[in-house]
Image: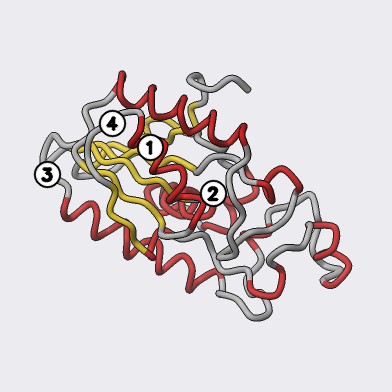
Amino acid sequence: MTATVLLVRHGETIWNRDGRIQGWADSTLTERGREQARALGSHLDSEYDLDRLVASDLQRTRETAALLDEAGIGPDPAFERAWRERDFGDWQGLTRAEIAERLPEYDPDGSLLAVASVPGGESLGAAERRVLDGWERLVAEVGDGETAAVVTHGGPIRAVIAAVSGRDLAAVAPEFSPTNCGVTAIRCATEPAVVRRDATGHLSL
């Protein structure tokens, strides 16, 4: 069986723009985020024949999926909790600098995703298991030759990349942060492989 799964991050939100941690808290898309989602929709419509569209059930991914739908990409989205960002608990709404004041060992220039535990939120391990459960279900359901797109968040994208690459998520997390509406493509075969990571050629950056 060979199939393709496209992992795409939602459009820019107000909290993305302001440098605030979102997790499960919601912040609406900015006008730039809506433009990114429309550009992504046009790209997916012209470059891929999508058979499935899955999205995190948080507001910012729902907004992005709705704008993709307006672009006429085809399948209606199925919303799944598994594809949510990690729950950052008490840190949601704070900047990285504010978190570093509370957690001196945290480097605000580093990846918050790599921190093992957060007060009032999910552990790294719990978040990773949740996402990979969703990933494994999707791979089991997608048919031979099909293409599925998942509208999700930076953390889940890196969790899947780590799993497919056979690496630890804590090691992958600091390497890059997926771009809003960037596209990561994974070929699902006997040995899944990342064939494109965070492609942004369709965006005006």
Q: Is residue 32 above or below residue 52?
A: above
Residue 26 percent across, percent down from the top left = 58, 59
Query: Of the residues under marks 3 and 4, which one precedes in the sequence?
Result: 4
Q: Is residue 112 above or below residue 45?
A: below
Q: Which residue is mark 1?
A: 194
Distance CA(mark 1)–CA(mark 2): 16 Å
Q: Residues within 10 Å of mark 3 (few under 14, many from 20)?
A: some
Which quarter of the picture shows residue 123? bottom right
Q: Which residue is mark 2?
A: 154
Question: How many numbered discs, if any?
Answer: 4
Distance CA(mark 3)–CA(mark 2): 26 Å
Query: Of the residues under marks 1 and 3, which one precedes in the sequence?
Result: 3
At x 27% / y 59%, what residue is drawn?
136
Which quarter of the picture shows residue 53? top left
Distance CA(mark 1)–CA(mark 3): 18 Å
- Residue type of the residue flagged with mark 4: Ile
